[in-house]
Image: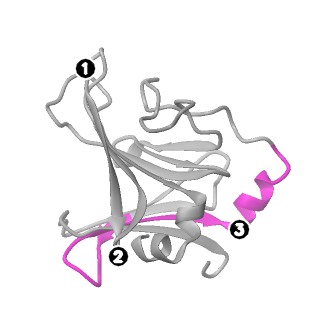
Amino acid sequence: YVADYFLFNVTFKSLVIDAGGRFQINGKLPNSYIELGPDFASNGTLVTVALATKDVQSQLGTNPADPHTLPGGRPLPGVAEGALPGYAITIAQLKDMTVYFGNKAFGIFMPVKLGIKDSIATFRFYGDGKRVGNISVVGTDSAGKNSGVLILMTQDLVNSAVGKKVL
């Protein structure tokens, strides 16, 4: 929590980009943003989701939006219900990157053309030898769209010392 923002950070140490940008999240969270750019502490890429306190407070007492699935409607891999209650925000400027957040989980779906059809592979990932969450490689759907990488963490993992270090 910094300067009235809840910050969620993920560093992709093997993904190298030389430039980045900050993109406003429109709709129900007008003061929040997503930032993508070179990581200062490594040669990788830092993705930051910043949720403004006043945006979060404006949503308190309201029910989260309907449960959300993968872009295109397929069930979320590794989630028994196939969907997560909360908010899913799609950022068109970032090629339809989707951020999921709610009471139980935090996640990011990054569209990537993978050349894989109709398949999803899910793996646990670890930080300092402790489980942090799941990462899924998502192939295209039946329409030949919506492939990418999905990273999911439960809120208790996000709030743990290891989860905070990974974020």
Which quadrant of the view contains residue 84? top right
Numbered tag placed on residue 128 in the rendering: 2
Q: Nearest the camera: 69 or 47?
A: 69
Residue 25 is situated, as x and y percent measured from the top left of the image, at 54, 53
User: Counting other residues with Cα less than 10 Å from the Cα at mark 1, is it few (<14), some (14-19), or many (20 or more)?
Assistant: few
Q: Amino acid at mark 1?
A: Gly
The secondary structure type at the circle numbered 3 is helix
Residue 75 is situated, as x and y percent measured from the top left of the image, at 46, 27
| Distance Cα–Cα, label 2 vs label 1 | 37 Å
Quadrant into which the C terminus falls: bottom left
Q: Residue furthest top?
A: 142
Numbered tag placed on residue 144 in the rendering: 1
The secondary structure type at the circle numbered 1 is loop
Q: Amino acid at mark 2?
A: Asp
Q: Amino acid at mark 3?
A: Thr
Which quadrant of the view contains residue 122? top left
> Which span of residues is magenta-colored?
36-62
Q: Dots 2 and 1: beta carbons under 8 Å?
A: no
The vertical placement of 117 against 10, above or below, is above
Residue 137 is situated, as x and y percent measured from the top left of the image, at 27, 41
Point out the tag, 2 or 1, that comes first from the N-terminus: 2
Q: Nearest the camera: 24 or 10?
A: 10
User: Counting other residues with Cα less than 10 Å from the Cα at mark 2, is it few (<14), some (14-19), or many (20 or more)?
Assistant: few
Point out the tag, 2 or 3, that comes first from the N-terminus: 3
Residue 82 is situated, as x and y percent measured from the top left of the image, at 52, 30
Q: Which residue is mark 3?
A: 53
Task: Judge depth for marks 2 and 1 and give the one in front.
Answer: 2
Q: Nearest the camera: 86 or 156?
A: 156
